[in-house]
Image (tube, helix red, strand yellow):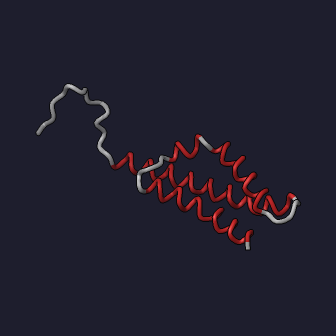
Amino acid sequence: MRLLLAFGIAFLLPVILVGLNFAGLMQGSTMLRGWRWVVVLALTFAAIATPTPEITAMFMLALPMLALFAVAIGLSVLNDRRRARREPGFGDLDDDTPSAL
């Protein structure tokens, strides 16, 4: 039962991260910047969650979780690019320039 719960949490986390990105609360670059910590935490979580001390079971949980995290980063970066392309580019205007309205 504990392993089933661990797999459920591990596979739901990337969905939550993509949801946060689509809501505009987290950028893909932020997730990309913390990938080293994610690897360490995923391996630690997998080592604690697996019922046996063998490394095979740990990697059977950690590798799909890391692959899904990589897919979540990819989707988030693509969504950030799409969002940046849709927004008008006012970055080149001076702060003191009045608007056309």
Residue at the spot x=30%, y=30% of the render? 92
Horizontal side of 15 relative to 10 (left or right) equals left
Q: Quadrant of residue 72?
A: bottom right
In the rendered image, residue 6, in percent from the top left (x then y), is placed at: 69, 65
User: Residue at position x 51%, y 49% from top?
Assistant: 77
Q: Nearer the viewer, residue 81 or 64?
A: 64
- Percent across and percent down for residue 2 are 73, 69
Q: Count the marks.
A: 0
**The N terminus lies in which quarter of the figure?**
bottom right
Looking at the image, residue 1 sits to the left or right of residue 29; the answer is: right
Most foreground residue, 20 or 101: 20
Q: Is residue 83 above or below residue 97?
A: below
* Residue at left offset 62%, top offset 55%: 69
At 47% across and 55% down in the image, what residue appears?
A: 20
Does 80 sit left or right of 52 as displayed? left
Q: Residue furthest left?
A: 101
Left or right of residue 64, residue 91 in this image: left
The C terminus - image quarter: top left
